[in-house]
Amino acid sequence: MPINTPQQITDSYAEASKGKATSPAWRLFVLAVAAGLLIGLGAVTSSTAAHALDNAGLVRLVSGLIFPLGLMMVILLGTELFTGNSLMVTAAIQRKITWGALARNWAIVFVGNFVGAVALAALMAFFGQLSIGGGDLAVYTAKVAAAKDSLPWANAFVLGAFCNIMVCVAVYLSNTAHDTAGRLLAIFFPIMGFVLAGFEHCVANMYYVPAGIFANMNPAYAGLIADAGINTAVLDFGTFLTANLIPVTLGNIIGGALVGIVMYACHGTKPSKAFDRGVAEAADEV
């Protein structure tokens, strides 16, 4: 079966954005909570698999092989992910949706993703999942969170931009296929790549960093984390917001919007000048 072409994908996503922009708030929120939870589950499973490894390259490889299952579940279940919705910028540029409708979608989906991912982080930290390895997983989780909160602001922004370039490319590639196996394969490699490269994804970080914060708050793990020499001073929600979530989110928006704009400029169907003139003349007659 032939794959969908870049032009078909670009045009269909712009049309789909109209539905995303007008969807009831409760539906957007529920689907966004689900997406935050699913991306978080990708983070849970990849961290669990990699936490006992000593080689940094091997840690990234194992994490990269497992983490893509999060986006696979998000796309196949039709949930709402903030990073993927950055592609809706092209629909606003084409005036298929208003900028206000775009902002509404982003705000609801961002909050929903946050709720789903942070709730999962709390459940993992306070109900025993981080006890794997005698608490080694909790130490690893806190270490990852502290490293993310310690990134320079500019670094977090740039790593966020490149991350969402790869995520949105994965979204595009998944839409080339007509069958489930093809869609999963298309998602896998770009997502594995961004994890290997150490790029920053705001929704994934909504799990990773709160999970480290909650692990440090849990008396069962706090001593182990302190003994590991982890910089716990950065493990708080204020630092997470200002040092990581804001710059990474802005970078994700820029990276995702860039993919959408380039694809629309090169492949999107544009109204002809004759069509525009016809519309204008019809309006004048009315």
Image (cartoon, rainbow, N blue to C red):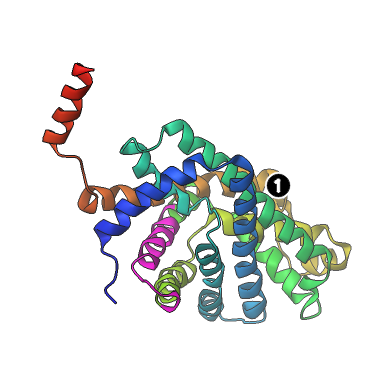
Q: Closer to the camera, 4 or 73?
A: 4
Residue 267 visible in this rendered orientation of the protein: yes
Residue at x-position 64% and y-position 67%: 41
Residue 231 visible in this rendered orientation of the protein: no
Q: In this view, which residue lies farthest toward the left?
A: 274
Q: Is residue 80 above or below residue 52?
A: above
- Residue designated by label 1: 237
Q: Percent position (x, y) of residue 36? A: 62, 57
Q: Closer to the camera, 251 or 122?
A: 122
Q: Closer to the camera, 55 or 8?
A: 8
Q: Quadrant of residue 180?
A: bottom left
Q: Which residues are magenta?
A: 161-181
Specify the amino acid type for callout 1.
Answer: Phe
Q: Percent position (x, y) of residue 38? A: 62, 64
Residue at x-position 77% and y-position 81%: 133
Q: Percent position (x, y) of residue 162? A: 40, 57
Q: Is residue 62 magenta?
A: no
- Relative to 285, is 186 on the left or the right? right
- Relative to 132, is 79 on the left or the right? left
Quick one: quadrant of the N terminus?
bottom left
